[in-house]
Image (spheres, helix red, strand yellow):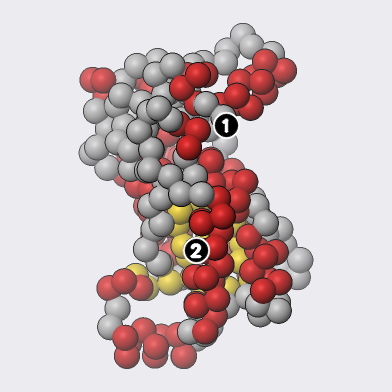
Amino acid sequence: MVVVKDQLDPNLRKIIKNKKQVAVIPIGSLEQHGPHLPVSTDSDLVTKIASRLAEKKNFLLFPTIDYGVSFEHAPFFNVSIKSSTLQKLLIDMCMSLSSNGIKMIFVINGHYGNQKVLINLGKKVKKVSNGKIRVFVLSYWNFMKSHFDHAGLSETSLMLAVSNKAKMRFAKKGLTTEGLNEKEISRLKKLATKSFPAVTKNGVWGDPRKSTKRQGEKMLLEIVNNLAKKCQTCLTAKNPNLHQ
C-alpha cells in the first residue's frame, strides 16, 4: 500500500511510472450517529476499510473525503454538501488522477446518503474522459452478511473494532423493524431519506446495546476480503458493474 499523502513527489512519480497504479478514494460524511457514536463515524469506518483494502491489494490510498450528502439528518447535526458538488469534486479528482497517469479508481463509499449521486459516477467519468478512465463505486455494507443499520448493532460493532470513540454508556435503542412487513419497512426507509429524525426519533436505526468489538472485527475482515475479491473482478473482467 502507498499512502499518497505521506509520499515525497519524486518517489510518488517514480511509483506511478514504474507500474500501472490503482487509486482508492474513501468517502464518508459528517453527521449525527445517535447519542453514543461520533459524527465522524462514516468517515472513520470507510477510512479503515479503504486502508485495509489498499494494503491487501497494494493500491494507492488517497485521503478520505469527510463530507457527504446528509441533509436528511437535520435538525440533528450534519455538515453536508450538495449532490452536484460531490459529483463535480469526484469527476475533477478522477480527471486530475488521469493526468498523473492513474486511470483505474475505486471509490469506497461509507455513507448511505451518497449513493444516489455516486450511482452514475463511473459512466460520467468514462464519458468525459473518452473512455480513458475506469471508476468503480463500492458501498462497503454491500459486502457483509450482517444487516446494515445506522448507529445500531452492526455500525456500532464496527466502530468498536476501529476506534475508541464509541461511548457505550450512552447507547440507546432506536427504531427497530422486527414485526413490520416489507411494505411498512420500505415506507420508513423512503421517509428516512427525507427526514431521518422523523423516523428514528433519537437518530438510531437499530439497537446498539449488544454491540461488541469482536463482532466488529469479524465484520471488518469479511468486508475487506469481499471488497478485495470484487476489486480483482473489476480489474480483470471485460464488463464489470461500475457500482455496487
Q: CA distance from mark 1 to mark 2?
A: 23 Å
The residue singled out by tag 1 in the image is 193
Relative depth, front residue between 108 and 97: 97
Q: Quadrant of residue 142?
A: top right
Amino acid identity at mark 2: Leu
SS for dot 2: helix
The residue singled out by tag 2 in the image is 89
Residue 195 appears at what percent x and percent y? Answer: 52, 26
Q: Residue furthest top?
A: 179
**Which one is earlier in the sequence, the residue at label 1 or at label 2?**
2
Residue at horizontal 71%, vertical 58%?
241
Residue at horizontal 67%, vertical 74%?
128
Residue 146 appears at what percent x and percent y? Answer: 53, 32
SS for dot 1: loop
Amino acid identity at mark 1: Thr
Quarter that holds the N terminus: bottom left
